[in-house]
Amino acid sequence: MTDMLFRTDPYRKSATAKVTGLTGEGGIILDRTVFYPRGGGQPGDSGRLVWADGKLPIATAVKGEGDDLVLVPAEPGVLPPIGAEVEQQLDWDRRHGHMRIHTALHLLSVVIPLPVTGGAIGAEKGRLDFDMPDAPEDKTVLEGRLNALVTRDLPVSEDWITEAELDANPDLVKTLSVQPPRGAARIRLVRIGAGDAQIDLQPCGGTHVARTGEIGKLSIGKIEKKGRQNRRVTISLA
């Protein structure tokens, strides 16, 4: 089982770890990692591994067997041996961009309170697809509301509930295309705002900034029709 350090500290940029396994495809399994694995629309992290006899660029991280996470090298090379101690160095600028955009997409789901049918996260832009038969009347108004939530500098925190509690509160799930993972007994919730100032609460396994002010100014790009009722809304960091 890989200890997912990014869960407790998404701002951690590096960490030592021990190699516990190598996959037949050339992937590397560590006992703990700062690399977020691809999932929920968020790309896997990139960076590098450094050890006594070598170094290796990492292209991405993916989920492996059971609770293992697998680091995928960016190019063929000598792998660290099982049992070796390595230093993980995250491509921080890219990860931080993912954190900013991911949190911004949660805000977008607040200003457009419609079911979400899909989404994707990048380091500089992202998008959500909505069950939206008619286009918004004024994109400028939407953009103003989105940036107003950013400038409120609301805290972003997490909580955990049981699967039974989620079943009793199905409205927490905004995404129609992706359901929260089951089988771990607990579901992670991401909350934006606190107390009477809470504006959003939904299941999410991704990494986020600590406060909305850290996102920075956002712009809304194209609003494209995708199918009979779906519309795609793209946002980017200004």
Image (tube, rainbow, N blue to C red):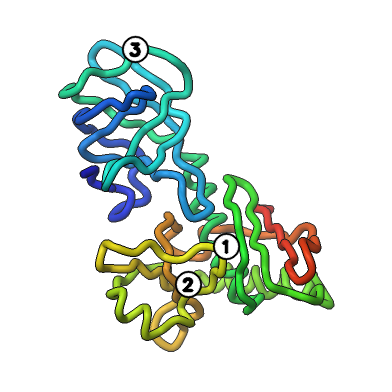
- Determine the CA span between mark 2 and mark 1: 12 Å
Q: Amino acid at mark 3?
A: Val
Quarter location, residue 227: bottom right
Q: Is residue 140 left or right of residue 125?
A: right
How far from the left and from the top, in percent, is residue 232? 72, 62
Residue at image x 40%, y 44%? 37
Q: Amino acid at mark 2?
A: Leu
Up/down of 15 relative to 78, above or below:
below
The answer to whether the residue labelled 2 contacts the one labelled 3, judged by CB atoms less than 8 Å apart, is: no
Q: Which residue is under mark 1?
A: 104
- 46 vs 22, nearest the viewer: 22
Up/down of 32 relative to 114, above or below:
above
* The residue positioned farthest toward the bottom in the image shown: 196
Residue at image x 18%, y 22%? 84
- Determine the CA span between mark 2 and mark 3: 45 Å
Q: Earlier in the sequence, mark 2 or mark 1?
A: 1
- Mark sitting on residue 78: 3
How far from the left and from the top, in percent, is residue 34? 33, 41
Q: Nearer the viewer, mark 3 or mark 1?
A: 3
Q: Earlier in the sequence, mark 3 or mark 1?
A: 3
Q: Earlier in the sequence, mark 2 or mark 3?
A: 3
Q: Amino acid at mark 1?
A: Ala
Q: Which residue is under mark 2?
A: 154
Residue at image x 71%, y 72%? 144
